[in-house]
């Protein structure tokens, strides 16, 4: 009875962490909306790149496949968050294609085809693996690799913040949402004993903490520098 109660509480904690992760991930999914409002208003993609959305779609689709019962067990929250994420990314890509020039339009259409082709090969190839454990390892390493590379992208922003001593290009709420989502799925993976979930999200949690620490440090310094300036400047 004690073991049953423990497993039930563990399952409940996993579900709570997964639901929290889905909620915080939604904040990340809607974060590009101001950019696309500008694109639609100006009817031009200007200097914006569509590659991050292509890569995010690839990541969501691979992780969505990993979360299905064909590959792993008890990963419903992974399926929900990545299905919503894939939908958002696909909408962003379509909007980008509609408002970009002909050259970029063909490039984005080609990359979109490549994404679906790669995911199709992964799905078809993994289904050819009869052993469930081997299939889990195969897709798990792929999903873990894409997540780690996605979480590594803030390293460029962190380097920029340190170099410029400015948090202009690192919005606080985006960093906070990344940290909270990663921490939630870190717990989700731990409660589910899934190394392919808690390992990349553990890395994401650490990077999120670094981003928040840098934001607090450089934001506080910029405020301190502003307060050092005299309120009234006399030229007499």
Image (spheres, rainbow, N blue to C red):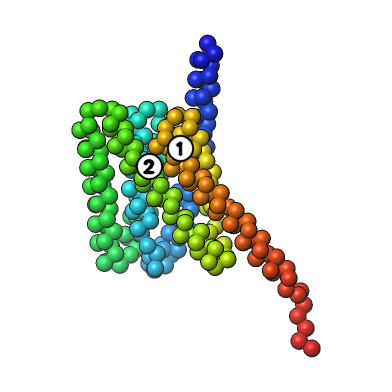
Horizontal side, residue 179 vs residue 141: left or right: right
Name the secondary structure under disc 1: helix
**Residue at point 24% right, 35% down?**
126
Which disc, if any, is residue 144? Answer: 2
Q: Are marks 2 and 1 in contact (CB under 8 Å)?
A: no
Where does the image place residue 207, in percent across and percent down from the top left? 51, 50
**Residue at point 45% right, 29% down?**
192
Q: Is residue 181 visible?
A: no
Q: Residue furthest right?
A: 236
Earlier sequence position, callout 2 versus callout 1: 2
Give above or below for 130 relative to 108: above
* Residue behind mark 1: 198
Relative depth, front residue between 51 and 35: 51
Other residues around mark 1 within 10 Å, as few (<14) / some (14–19) / many (≥20)? many
**Residue at point 48% right, 46% down?**
204
Q: CA distance from mark 2 to mark 1?
A: 9 Å
Horizontal side, residue 211 vs residue 139: left or right: right
Relative depth, front residue between 43 and 24: 24
Q: Residue furthest top?
A: 1
Where does the image place residue 140, in percent across and percent down from the top left? 34, 37
Name the secondary structure under disc 2: helix
The quadrant of the image that shows the C terminus is bottom right
Where does the image place residue 66, in percent across and percent down from the top left? 34, 36
Horizontal side, residue 78 vs residue 120: left or right: right
Q: Is residue 130 visible?
A: yes
């Amino acid at each position: 009875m004690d073991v049953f109660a423990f497993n039930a509480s563990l399952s409940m904690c996993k579900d709570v962490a997964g639901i929290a992760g889905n909620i915080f991930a939604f904040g990340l999914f809607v974060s590009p909306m101001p950019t696309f409002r500008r694109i639609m208003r100006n009817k031009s993609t200007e200097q914006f790149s569509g590659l991050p959305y292509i890569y995010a779609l690839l990541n969501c689709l691979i992780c969505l496949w990993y979360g299905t019962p064909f590959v792993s067990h008890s990963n419903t929250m992974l399926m929900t968050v990545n299905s919503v994420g894939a939908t958002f990314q696909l909408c962003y890509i379509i909007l980008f294609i509609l408002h970009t020039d002909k050259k970029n339009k063909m490039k984005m259409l080609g990359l979109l085809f490549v994404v679906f082709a790669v995911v199709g090969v992964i799905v078809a190839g993994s289904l050819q693996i009869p052993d469930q454990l081997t299939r889990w390892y195969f897709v798990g390493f792929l999903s873990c690799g894409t997540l780690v590379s996605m979480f590594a992208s803030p390293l460029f922003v962190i380097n920029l913040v340190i170099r410029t001593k400015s948090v202009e290009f690192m919005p606080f709420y985006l960093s906070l949402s990344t940290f909270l989502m990663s921490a939630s799925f870190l717990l989700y993976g731990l409660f589910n004993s899934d190394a392919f979930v808690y390992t990349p999200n553990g890395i994401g949690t650490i990077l999120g903490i670094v981003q928040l620490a840098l934001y607090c440090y450089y934001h506080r310094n910029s405020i301190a520098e502003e307060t050092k300036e005299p309120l009234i400047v006399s030229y007499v």
